[in-house]
Amino acid sequence: MTGADRRAAAAARHRLLPEGRVAGPMPWVIAIMMFLTVLAAAAGLGLGTAVRSVGSQLAGRVTVQIVEANADRREEFSGRAVRLLRKSPDVRALHPVDPAALADQIRPWLGEEAVSGDLPIPALIDVELTAGSTQAKVARLRATMAALSPSIRIEPHATFLQPLGQLLAALGGLAAGIVLLMAVATAAIVVLAARAAHDSHRGTIDVLHLMGATDVQIARLFQRRIGLDALFGGFLGFTVALLVILLLGARLSATGSDLVGAISLSWAGWLVLAALPLGGVLLATLAARWTVLRSLGRLL
C-alpha cells in the first residue's frame, strides 16, 4: 500500500468513527447502567457484611430471662443464676443487664409504668457460650436453670435473629442478581449500538475492504470507539454512584443503630466497586468486537 493509500485509509477511518468526543446516547445509557450496577453491587456487598455480623451474634449467644412477678424473689433468682452460670464450663462470659437500662429501653413503649415498680420486668443476663455445639450447651444450661426455678428461661439469639439474617442474605442475593442483569443489559446495548454503527457505515467498510483492510482491523476501529464511550460512561456513572454511596453511608451512621451500622463496605468491597467500570469497558469492547466480526462475516 502506497503512502497515499495509507493516508486515504486513515482519513476514511476517522470519518468512520471519529475519536476524542462523546457522540450519541450510548455513553449516557452506559453511565446510567453503571450507576445502577455500582449501587446494586454496593448494596449486595454491604448486606453481605451485615449477614456476617449477624452470624457472629448468632454464634454462641443466649439470653437468660428470670420471669418472676415478685421483685425480691426475682432478684434472688438472678443472683443465684449468675453464680451458677459463672461456674458452668459452657459459659465463656456473662453480662447481667442493668434493670435501669432495661427500663429506659422500654419506657418509650410502656411509659412511666416501666419504672414505677407495678409492672414486673424480667431480669436479663446476656451469656456468651464457649466454642462448640451451641445446641448441646443450651440444653445443659436449661436443665441447670430449670433445677433452680421454672421461671427461668433461656432464649438463644438465633431464635429471633436468624430470620433477620436470612432476610439480609436474600436481599444480598437479589442485589447480585441485579448486577448480573445489568451486565447482560449493558452487553445487549453495546451489541445494538455496534450493529447500528456497522449498518450506517456499510459503504465506508466496503471501501476499506477494497483498500486491503481486514475484518479484524475494521472491528478494532469499532471496539476502540465503543470502548472510549464505555470508559466515559462508566467513569461518570461510577462517580455519581460513589457520591450517593458516601451520602447514604453518612446517613446510616447517623442512625446510631448497631444493626444498620453493620451494613458497611470493607476494603475488598471498595476494590470490587472500583473494578466495575473497568469490567464494563472490557465487556463493551468484547461485545463490540464480537458483534462487528459476526456482522462482517455475514457480508462474505
Image: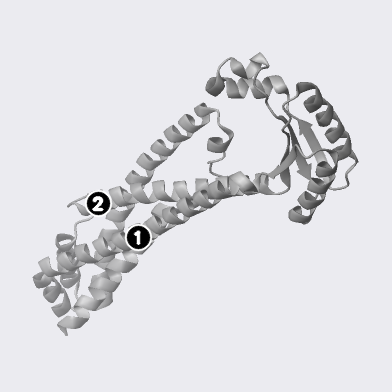
Q: Which residue is under mark 1?
A: 181
| Residue 296 percent across, percent down from the top left | 20, 78
Question: Is residue 239 visible to the viewer in this orientation of the structure?
Answer: yes
Nearer-N-terminus badge (2/1):
2
Q: Residue at x 88, y 38 (%)?
A: 84
Where is the C terminus found, in terms of image quarters? bottom left
- What's the residue type where badge 2 is placed? Val
For residue 206, above or below residue 87:
below
Side of 183 where 72 appears, left or right: right
Q: Residue at x 74, y 30 (%)?
A: 68
- What's the residue type where badge 1 is placed? Leu
For residue 261, above or below residue 224:
above
Q: Mark 2 or mark 1: which is in front?
A: 1
Side of 103 where 21 appears, left or right: left
For label 2, the crowd category at 10 Å Cα-Cα, with few meaning under 14, some 14 to 19 and many 20 or more, is some
Most foreground residue, 114 or 92:
114
Q: Secondary structure at mark 1?
A: helix
Q: Which residue is under mark 2?
A: 29
